[in-house]
Amino acid sequence: MKRETIRLWTVALCGAAAFALAAPVMAKDIVLKPGGAVDFYATVNAVREVTVGNPMPGLHLDAKVKGRMMDIYIAPMDFVAKYGIKVSKGDEVRIVGQVTLGEAEVVLAREITTGKFDDKAGFFRETLTTYLRNDDGPFWEESRPGPGLTSTY
């Protein structure tokens, strides 16, 4: 009887320890607060071009993040064309960026990585990462050097 009690407590403690160690991984939830940094994977639901004369003209993606649709601003269309940024509906992407501080909730993409989520292996297989901006601002401004493009075939 005593041996079973010890075994039961050992299993319970191991389970509690495993949960405590896994909690930070499970907590990698996307925090969508204005001005906050984000890093998430999503499937593109729509690709839109916002015309010049409107706020944030250029390539926008719509993707479901935390159960709600988000507008993800990539870059102006001339920059998109120059660096061959190609994203289509149904593509899987990783977005690193920041939520804007305006009325509308828009994610300003800092980098976009295209690829495919491998369900069997349980990870994202990257194909191409395009860096769009850094702490100093977007790379498409005249005085800025171009972005770094990284192919990870």
Image (cartoon, helix red, strand yellow):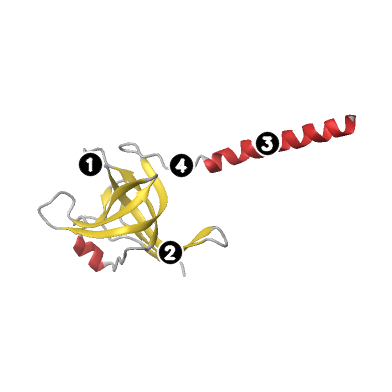
> In the rendering, which numbered label is found on residue 115?
2
| Earlier sequence position, callout 4 versus callout 2 | 4
Q: Secondary structure at mark 4?
A: loop
Q: Nearer the viewer, residue 134 or 88?
A: 88
Rate crowding at label 2 as few (under 14), some (14 to 19) or many (20 or more) other CA atoms within 10 Å. some
Tag 2: amino acid: Gly
- Name the amino acid, label 4: Asp
| Left or right: where 75 falls relative to 7 | left
Of pointers 2 and 1, the one earlier in the residue sequence: 1
Whole-angstrom CA distance, mark 2 to mark 1, is 28 Å
Provide the secondary structure element on which disc 2 rests.
strand
Q: Which residue is mark 4?
A: 29
At 12% from the left and 56% from the top, the residue drawn is 52
> 33 or 5: nearer the eye?
5
Name which quarter of the figure residue 33 lies in. Answer: top left
Q: Give SS at disc 3.
A: helix
| CB contact under 8 Å: marks 4 and 2 | no
